[in-house]
């Protein structure tokens, strides 16, 4: 008898998609806003992004289980909107894979003492196999990775948490410092930290219904939020706000963050646990994001679900970001910021428009519906628009920028 997929497995897939970007991007992005305003921005983003994912489920209920953004958006919102959405989905998925591949190369270069580019190639060659194999394989490895992350996180972060300095955590030394203005530029990175939406169709297909997928989504975003809170608390409680200057100068690269942390961590075992956690976070997100992009491109190109078809999908999913990573490596947080600015299209605006269209259909009032009426649709769209505006204002130097 075939076993039914567990909610824990699905929640771990969603959480694993989120935590790579969030864990490694949020500390540097939130250095200006610091503890209180960072946690507030993360919490608000988590709520909106959970609801917008549910909106996709509401729209997807009209279609068979193998569809994704491409088919649904084209049929419900038209070819032009679908083309814009496709570009945004692939851009964000590709740039996240690109950021993870580059970061893994930097970390493996230090761990294995090999060339960074070779490390990136090996990383893709070995770990993308799980995505090529099946969603079930991703489920299994995601559970293992989340368990490993929790163990290394508990061991590493407990070492940090024990040594948390409250004066550092709340930056009491700088009585006249401003924090709130820096939170605006943090929203694009926070949004990317909950950017699991390309995996919503995979979750729906995995469970065969919308309601279980709904619980897997909120389970996954809740796990991610809890991990973010612990991580921010531990990092900001040990690494003074002023010490983020060299990390920010290097574009928030993961190796720079780990290097700064090593200067304040006295225990070698704790430092190794933090390094292991960071690598697991990147790996889990690489596999989770890879699955979402893989399923999206399989639907877009109409590749068959056979070994040959999945091999074609593997090529268009992983080779372009690998090549770009080898040719043009740059700041991790910069990449995540670009992803967040563009991701507002398909994580906020498109889901709300799809849900609105769904409700205008004859069968729209049947089955799964996100509560909140038209007000919640408006809130999600406005949140997405403002997040995109904040990103482009930050790029233009029109928002306060923290340099340490």
Image (cartoon, helix red, strand yellow):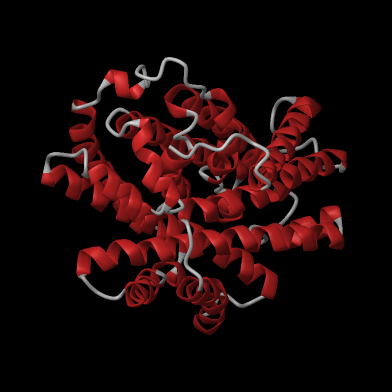
In the figure, residue 95 lies in which quadrant?
A: bottom right
* Location of the C terminus (image quadrant): top left
Q: Nearer the viewer, residue 140 or 390?
A: 390
- The N terminus, quarter of image: bottom left
**Disc count in the image?**
0
Between residues 265 and 369, which one lies in front from this camera angle?
Answer: 265
Q: Residue at x 37, y 75 (%)?
A: 117
Do we see residue 208 in this rendering?
no
Vertical arrangement, residue 289 with respect to residue 372, above or below: below
Above or below residue 347? Residue 368 is above
Q: For this rendering, which residue is in front, 373 or 388? A: 388
* Picture coordinates of residue 369, whole percent (x, y): 71, 34
Q: Is residue 213 left or right of residue 264?
A: right
Q: Position of residue 102 (x, y in %)?
A: 42, 65
Name the residue furthest bottom. Answer: 308
| Depicted 284 relative to depicted 179: above or below | below
Residue 128 located left or right of residue 304: left
């Amino acid at each position: 008898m075939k076993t039914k997929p567990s909610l824990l497995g699905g929640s771990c897939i969603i959480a694993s998609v989120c935590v790579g970007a969030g864990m490694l991007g949020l500390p540097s992005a939130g250095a200006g806003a610091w503890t209180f305003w960072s946690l507030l921005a993360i919490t608000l983003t988590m709520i909106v992004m959970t609801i917008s994912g549910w909106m996709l489920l509401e729209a997807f209920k009209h279609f068979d289980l193998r569809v994704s953004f491409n088919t649904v958006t084209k049929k419900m919102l038209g070819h032009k909107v679908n083309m814009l959405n496709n570009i945004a989905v692939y851009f964000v998925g590709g740039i996240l894979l690109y950021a993870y591949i580059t970061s893994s190369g930097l970390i493996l270069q230090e761990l294995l003492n090999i060339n960074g580019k070779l490390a990136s190639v090996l990383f893709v060659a070995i770990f993308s196999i799980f995505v090529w194999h099946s969603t079930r394989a991703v489920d299994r490895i995601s559970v293992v990775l989340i368990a490993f992350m929790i163990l290394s996180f508990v061991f590493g972060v407990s070492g940090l948490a024990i040594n948390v300095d409250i004066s550092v955590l709340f930056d009491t030394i700088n009585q006249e410092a401003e924090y709130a203005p820096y939170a605006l530029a943090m929203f694009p990175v926070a949004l990317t930290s909950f950017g699991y939406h390309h995996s919503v169709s995979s979750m729906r297909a995995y469970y065969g219904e919308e309601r279980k997928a709904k619980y897997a989504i909120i389970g996954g975003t809740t796990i991610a939020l809890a991990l973010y809170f612990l991580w921010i608390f531990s990092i900001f409680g040990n690494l003074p706000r002023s010490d983020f200057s060299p990390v920010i100068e290097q574009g928030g690269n993961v190796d720079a963050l780990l290097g700064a942390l090593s200067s304040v961590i006295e225990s070698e075992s704790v430092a190794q646990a933090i390094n292991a956690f960071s690598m697991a976070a990147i790996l889990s997100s690489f596999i989770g994001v890879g699955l979402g992009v893989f399923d999206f491109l399989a639907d877009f190109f109409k590749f068959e679900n056979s070994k040959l078809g999945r091999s074609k999908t593997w090529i268009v999913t992983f080779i372009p970001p690998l090549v770009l990573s080898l040719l043009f490596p740059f700041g991790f947080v910069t990449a995540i910021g670009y992803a967040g600015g563009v991701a507002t299209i398909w994580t906020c605006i498109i889901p709300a428009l799809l849900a609105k269209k769904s409700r205008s259909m004859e069968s729209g009032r049947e089955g799964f519906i996100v509560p909140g009426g038209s007000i919640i649709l408006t809130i999600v769209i406005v949140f997405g628009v403002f997040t995109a505006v904040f990103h482009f204002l930050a790029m233009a130097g029109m928002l306060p920028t923290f340099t340490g």
